[in-house]
Image (cartoon, rainbow, N blue to C red):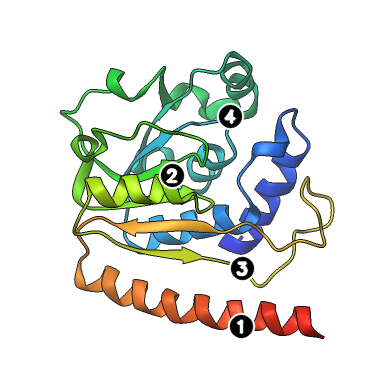
Amino acid sequence: MNKESFANKKYLEFSNYEGSQHIASEFAIFKVLELAEKFNAKSFLEIGLGIGSIVSSITDYFPKEAISYVGTEANEFCLNSLKTNLKDNYTSVQIFHDLPQITIEKKYDFMIIDGKCSGLNGIENNVNKNAILCIEGDRQDQVAEVKKVFPKAIDVHLISDKKNSDGGVFDTNAYQGGIKVFFVDPTFGQRVYWLKEKIKTKKIYKKRIGNQDE
């Protein structure tokens, strides 16, 4: 199954779970998988696991022995949901109450930050030199905080030209939610990807505006 079909399957699966109004968009799931695969991410840290749409997607898509996954979650409802929603992958995910509980001896290739999380001070201690950071949505306070922590970072807001799929939790008349991506100390390959996505995003914005004018 290709990544787009897999992301659609996961989005529809999690749309049926209680608490689904806060899951990642289909597009966000797809882009996280694309980035992780393209840049060979092996270790993941997710701040704010929620009910598990992203962690489930990553741990189901990649072989268990090929990756490690750590996340934070303090909400009791979400913690209980993760036990059910992650199924057999639950025991392979390390879950902590908050970021300070996670040892800084281990560095991560890929960090996912829930769009509602705040207080990101110290995240520079948890990532590898050329790590990728993804934020669900595009909250400006979070963006400013990440840029302060990673002054060398380059970022791009990835958006979709597709509407939300039928059968899912989100409005089918609305576009699939986007995702903000940071390359904290970009390699040449990451800069090339960033530039291509910048151009693509501009084209999609123009297409969206054109569709509104019709």
> Helix, strand or loop at disc 3?
loop
Disc 1 or disc 3, which is closer to the eye? 1
Circle 3: is it few (<14), some (14-19), or many (20+) Cα within 10 Å?
some
Circle 4: is it few (<14), some (14-19), or many (20+) Cα within 10 Å?
many
- Which residue is at a point 20% across and 32% down the rendered structure image? 106
Which badge, 4 or 2, is on the more N-terminal residue? 2
Q: Is residue 39 left or right of residue 80?
A: left
Q: Quadrant of residue 63?
A: top left
Which residue is disc 3 drawn over?
A: 160
Q: Give, as a three-letter code, the residue at label 1.
A: Lys
Residue 147 in the image: above or below residue 69: below
Which badge, 1 or 3, is on the more N-terminal residue? 3
Residue 62 percent location from the top left of the image:
45, 47
Q: Give, as a three-letter code, the residue at label 2.
A: Pro
Circle 2: is it few (<14), some (14-19), or many (20+) Cα within 10 Å?
few
Which residue is disc 2 drawn over?
A: 63
Which residue is disc 4 drawn over?
A: 86
Answer whether labels 4 and 2 touch (C-beta < 8 Å): no
Answer whether labels 3 and 2 touch (C-beta < 8 Å): no
Depth check, front residue: 45 or 4: 45
Which badge, 1 or 2, is on the more N-terminal residue? 2
Q: Give, as a three-letter code, the residue at label 3.
A: Ser
**Distance from Cα at disc 3 to Cα at disc 2:** 27 Å
Residue 88 percent location from the top left of the image:
56, 27
Which badge, 3 or 2, is on the more N-terminal residue? 2
Disc 4 or disc 2, which is closer to the eye? 4
Q: Which mark is residue 206?
A: 1
Which badge, 1 or 4, is on the more N-terminal residue? 4
